[in-house]
Image: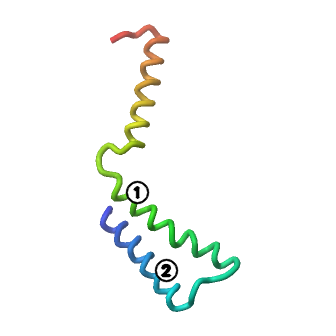
Amino acid sequence: MRILAILFNLLLIGVVIFLLAKEGVPEGNELLLVIPMIFAPIFSLIAIFGAKGDNWLSLYLKRKALEEKQKIDQLTGNKD
């Protein structure tokens, strides 16, 4: 699934580059549609390649969950 996502993102980047080379940079409202088509697959690829093991976001969320569990244990009087 990860390889398929990478392939489709690269395909979208290639199509956007081809269209920009063939048609030129769009103007007006069309530019608002092209900007996400450029940046979305780039950010998606960054997220896919950056999702190896414990990244900063997953570590942060795990820490917050542990802190909340400890608060609940303190309030209920459960000390393991």
- Under tag 2, what secondary structure? helix
Question: Is 32 placed left or right of 11 in the picture?
Answer: right
Quarter of the image with the C terminus is top left
Quarter of the image with the N terminus is bottom left
Could you say which quadrant of the image residue 11 lies in? Answer: bottom left
Q: In terms of sequence position, does the residue under pointer 1 or pointer 2 come before the other?
A: 2
Q: From the viewer's perspective, is residue 17 above or below residue 64? A: below
| Other-residue count near label 2 (Cα within 10 Å), few / some / many at <14 / 14–19 / ≥20 | some
Q: Amino acid at mark 2?
A: Val
Q: Amino acid at mark 1?
A: Ala
| Other-residue count near label 1 (Cα within 10 Å), few / some / many at <14 / 14–19 / ≥20 | few
Residue that mark 2 sits on? 16
Q: From the viewer's perspective, is residue 20 above or below residue 64? A: below
Seen at 42% across and 43% down, the residue is: 57
Residue that mark 1 sits on? 47
Q: Residue furthest top?
A: 77
Could you say which quadrant of the image residue 66 lies in? Answer: top left
Q: Position of residue 20 (x, y in %)?
A: 52, 85
